[in-house]
Image: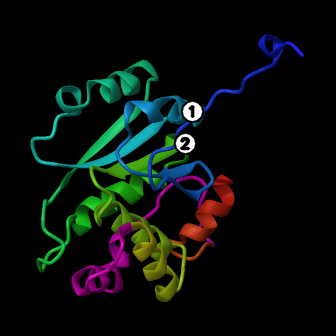
Amino acid sequence: MNRNNSRSSPLYTTPLQFQIIEPRLYRGLYPTEENLDFLKTLELKTIIIVLPEGFDISIETPYYSDFITKNNISLHQFQDENVKRRDKAVGISVEEIVKIIEIVADPNSYPIFIHDLTNESVTPLIVAIFRKLAYWNLVSIIDEFIAYSGNVNVHERKFIEEFPMKQIHIENDLIKESDEINSITSWIRRVGI
């Protein structure tokens, strides 16, 4: 048998802690150069990233900045409040999460990749609020949070439990007037994601 004639399949490396949140909505750790071939297969239209103030991806990780530019990906960058998990605050504000959910609610943004620099608590908080919008029960939300961040502290749990859901308004043509106000599940059903 001639081994040179055998087909080799490409080997892709997913970002660490990669997860499909919903079809065409992904999360993971900050990608390395080895992850870019995999990310290209996702045909991303949007990347949502939460970074500390002063972190410039074009300087810190030019390979990633080039990847985003070459693939015509829309980049939405938000600021991490850079707190230690044992502190009283969490690493992202209510207002920032509301803005992120508005991007996620736009069907023209898909496929979307969400991440922060370390995935310690900010991305898990964003996903936790998304799960809350989708009417997951708190135990399942906290279990998933712990699976991706290692643990949950009292401040993070309180932030999830007390998140002011009324601040989120999903407005697009896919939601009919008869739908329950702010129903992300009815929106997801219509978008078909």
Foreground pick, 35 / 189 = 35
Q: Point out the stretch of residues depicted in magenta.
A: 149-178
Give the left or right position of residue 99, taking residue 190 as reference. left
Q: Is residue 48 above or below residue 10?
A: below
User: Which mark is first along the chain, 1 or 2?
Assistant: 1
* Residue wearing tag 1: 43
- For badge 1, the amino acid type reads Glu
| Residue 162 lies in the magenta stretch | yes
Q: Amino acid at mark 2?
A: Pro
- Nearest to the observer: residue 119 or residue 189: 119
Q: For the point 36% across and 77% down, which residue is it?
A: 166
Q: Which residue is mark 2?
A: 111
Residue for point 17% across, 27% down? 59
At a point 43% along the width and 52% down the height, the residue shown is 28
Rendered location of residue 134, percent (x, y): 54, 73
Q: Are marks 2 and 1 in contact (CB under 8 Å)?
A: yes
Is residue 160 rendered to the left or right of residue 189?
A: left
